[in-house]
Amino acid sequence: MYMFGLSYRQVEKFLPLLDCRGGKSSIERDVTEAGQKARDLHGQGPGVRVRVLGVDGTGAAMAGRQAGVLFFVDVEGGKLIGVEPIQETDTRRLRRHVAKVMAMVGSEELRTDEYSGYAGIVPEGQHRLCLTHWRKSKGKRAADLHRRALREERPLEAESMRRLLAILRLKPRPPTVPEELSTLVRRYINCRKGLLWEINKLLQHIERTWEKVSDDPADPTNNATERIIGLTFKIRSKTMRGFKSQSKVLAHPYLSSFLRGDDGLCDLRKVI
């Protein structure tokens, strides 16, 4: 019940309806122990091969501060591979650990967002950007510039951003840079001031990263990683003030993953 979103105190109030009794502190202890057992079971499992490794970081509220946590996920299987207490801003540790996990699971591809710390960990062709994240961030910037162009009564620039938004939404997405995008880049390539400079920077960035974005026909996104982070921390954090220790931060995602099980089934006897 705690993992489904109730607080320890709410679980304590609910248990008598099931003819059970348990204090808030004992419930917290039981959840902690189950989480640690789930983490241990995860580490004892057989080695896995992962073709596409998704990596993303998030923050977890802990004892009055934010603790950085790095998630590793099998993108195709939607399964948690591991969780490490690493801040994305700690570039050296991040790069070292990502490379270690890539080698451990034999991944052919690293799938991330555009955070610069992930660049260069593996050969360029093996590192692909999440299509959803890339398209969302570029689309937001293009829409902002479109509105700014309308406010400044710049119809040509507004039309350029409207066309850029249409290019970003193309389905199927061309694997190489579309000629229309190259034309827009050339139009603004020498601009260095104001609105035109902002448009120039955006267009060049999109052209430079276009072919780095995943074109995997099965799933070009890193949504599996985002979903696991959401189920583990983002949704739960709305109903709690934070974790009391790092061990609880790390045990929670393993218990959450264990409870989801295989095809929705798990053996609770393994963690109780």
Image (tube, grey):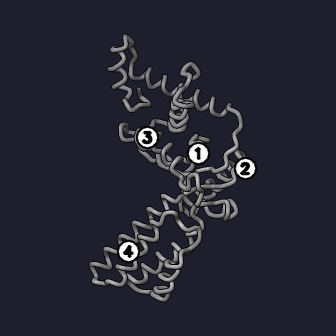
Circle 2 SS class = helix
- Of circles 2 and 4, the one toward us is 4
Q: First in sequence: mark 2 or mark 3?
A: 3
Q: CA distance from mark 2 to mark 3?
A: 34 Å
Q: First in sequence: mark 3 or mark 1?
A: 3
Circle 4 SS class = helix
Looking at the rendered image, the quarter that the N terminus falls into is top left
- The tag on residue 162 is 4
Q: First in sequence: mark 2 or mark 1?
A: 1
Q: Residues within 10 Å of mark 4 (few under 14, many from 20)?
A: some
Q: Which residue lies under the disc numbered 2?
A: 103
Q: Which residue lies under the disc numbered 1?
A: 73
In the displayed image of the protein, which residue is found farthest to the top? Answer: 19
Kind of residue indicated by mark 1? Val
Kind of residue indicated by mark 4? Arg
Q: CA distance from mark 3 to mark 1?
A: 27 Å
- The tag on residue 63 is 3
